Amino acid sequence: MTQPRVTVLLIEDNPRDAQIMQEALLEAKETAFVVEWVDRVSKGLDRLAQGTVDLVLTGLQLPDSNGLQTVTRIREQAKGVPIIVLTSLDDEALAIQALQKGAQDYLVKGYIQVYRNLLVRSIRYAIERSRTEEERTRLEKDFAAAVAAAAVADRKRAAELDEAYQELKRTQAMLVQAEKLAAVGQLASGIAHEVKNPLGIILQCVNYLEPELSAKGGSQAEILQVMREAVKTSDKIIRGLLDFSRPTPLELKSTPILTVINASLALVQAQAHDKKIRLTTDVVPEVPPVMLDEHQMQQVFINLILNAFHAMPQGGALTIRGRVKRLTEARTGIGRRTNDTFQIGETALVCEIHDTGTGIPKEILPNVFNPFFTTKPPGEGVGLGLAITASIIQGHRGIIYIESKEGRGTTVSIILPLSSATPRPGRGDGQD
């Protein structure tokens, strides 16, 4: 059987003591010791820097090092290599200090001369203790790493559970909102049909009476005009109810989004000038055409632009941006579930309408897409614009959301798919 080979670095300036140590190791029968002898700590450190040393035997009183600093210097150079201190003094206190400095054992040279196997046994025990200590250190590190990994996994699972819970809450809120919208749509449709016919009769009566009363002059003609305007206003509200409750089928075709934006801005250019609002478009040339209903998407942009104008009574700036983006942030409609409108990592067209207006209060923001919700004064709106806008975007298999801070403006984001796709049930399929 091949004997295990152990390389021992002997640092000793006394040749006679060095010879005794070498002879004691050469007499070993179960281990093949290779002894490399140097007489200076500096030489020993140079040898340790080369590696392949299994153990260090060193004296304490050397020409270039004195006392326990010898152990410290060797320990710093040869981390993990066991050290046995050789000394002429049988000093228990010194021995304890040497062990505290990192030595594995402390031997008196005189004992080695009498008990030749003492050195061999001490070396074997020192190497074994060192290996045991290394293994213990490794296991502690592995355990600490495992604990840290488990903690990270627990935090990740907790975050995933929280995200799932929040997503469940959002989904429940969406379902409740969908039920509300369905109920409102049915109610609005019924009311609209019931009211539209009487309004038509009233308008016919006004038209019948107008020639006769106009000829007489006086306040009666003015009253008829007031009635006519009231009927027109009511009819406009009814048409909005019908638009909301009975969506118009989409007529999809490949259209550059910049075409829709420019056409929408052309219709509001005069109002922007009167209100001292600066209009800016920032649509990159690389944006490809998308499948959309140009007329209905123009209705979306005009509605959002006019809402922005309303939020800037003292003037300001409105910017419309268009980019192709990779969706990386989970939010309502963007996630990893099969029923999400967009998947994380999907590329889509993102349009942003940003204004520098008064902003929307935080407590109002969740309600802006609810039908009949409005912050405008009476007579200026019935709160169907954003509800219809959201319905149109849903029909295009897209999503819309609003971010706003009071006093700092509002950004409306519209996300549309790049590839042609069959519209989802909603405004685009003609269903209630």
Image (cartoon, rainbow, N blue to C red):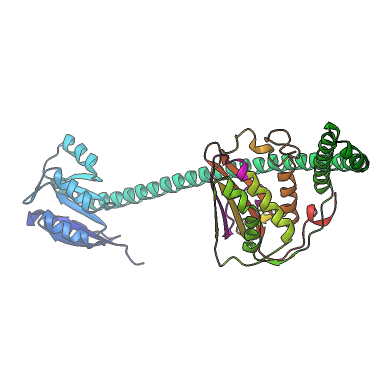
> What is the x, y in percent for residue 410?
57, 43
Residue nearest the viewer, comparing 423 with 188: 188
Q: Residue visible at 23% across and 41% down? A: 99
The reply to whether residue 397 is in sight is: no
| Picture coordinates of residue 52, whole percent (x, y) | 26, 62
x 62%, y 60%: residue = 262
> Image check: 109 left or right of 388?
left
Q: Is residue 190 above or below residue 299?
A: above
Q: Quadrant for the N terminus, please.
A: bottom left
**Span shown in magenta:** 308-335
96 and 343: which is toward the camera? 343
> What residue is drawn where x is 23% and y is 45%?
103
Q: Quadrant of residue 16?
A: bottom left
Indicate the position of residue 30 as horizontal and vertical percent values: 30, 60
Question: What residue is at 27 percent from the left and 57 percent from the top?
Answer: 54
Quadrant of the image occupied by residue 347: bottom right
Q: Is residue 273 left or right of residue 173?
A: left
Direction left: furthest residue: 63
* Residue 323 screen position, x and y as percent: 57, 60
Tell me how many marks there are. 0
Looking at this view, is 368 or 25 the one in front? Answer: 368
Up-down: is 206 above or below 303?
Answer: above
Q: Between 86 and 345, which is closer to the camera in this rendering?
A: 345
Q: Is residue 328 magenta?
A: yes
- Above or below, 260 against 227 in this view is below
Find out whether residue 343 is within the magenta segment: no
Instruction: For residue 72, say whether it is visible.
Output: yes
